[in-house]
Image (tube, helix red, strand yellow):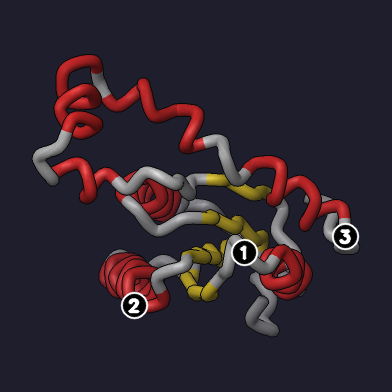
Amino acid sequence: MPDDTNSFGRPPKSILILGAGSLGESVLFSLALSSINLSHKICFHIASRNSERAGWLANSTNAMLRSLNAKHIAVHHVLDWANPETIAEIIERAQPHLIIQASSKQSMWTLKEQNEWSRLVQRIGYGITIALQSAFLLQTKRALEATTSNA
């Protein structure tokens, strides 16, 4: 987490969002916008398999926050779901007060392909993919347990 303090001399609050897809983006932008009038500083951490996308989200969030004169910041991290140590390292670095798991094995963008799965999701609704959304919860839990974080 950036070595910074808020107006009370305390480190900023920290929120870690795992996943930079459409859900991660919505959560990040919503939290950033809804927090602009808070007196304490917040550091939003966005972690994703896709470094370019996570970087874009952090930069976009920072631009939005600066344009609104908010003191919050966003930073990004690259995670590797195949390597649980990287998840624990990110948690250890960020020392989040809150972790939001928004990563999914099913990208919304892959549903634009014309195949049976995409047609089923289009017909029934994106909610059918919830099991794929929760696939990384156990890994997140184990990574959290391997850290000193109080999240």
Residue at (64%, 49%) from the top-left corner? Answer: 99
At which x and y percent is residue 121?
A: 24, 26
Task: Give neighbour class at mark 1: few <14, some 14-19, many 20+ (Cα, 10 Å).
Answer: few
Please tell me the numbered disc located at residue 82: 1
Of 106 and 2, nearer the camera is 106
Q: State yes or no: discs 2 and 1 in contact (Cβ < 8 Å).
A: no
Distance (Cα) linking label 2 and label 1: 19 Å
Distance (Cα) linking label 3 and label 2: 27 Å
Residue type marked 2: Glu
Disc 3: which residue? 146
Report if residue 48 is visible in the image. Answer: yes
At which x and y percent is residue 34?
A: 41, 45
Quarter of the N terminus within the rendering: bottom right
Outermost residue to the bottom: 3
At which x and y percent is residue 75?
A: 50, 75
43 on left or right of 106 = right
Q: State yes or no: discs 3 and 2 in contact (Cβ < 8 Å).
A: no
4 on left or right of 21 = right
Tag 3 secondary structure: loop
Please tell me the numbered disc located at residue 52: 2
Disc 2 or 1, which lies upstream in sequence? 2
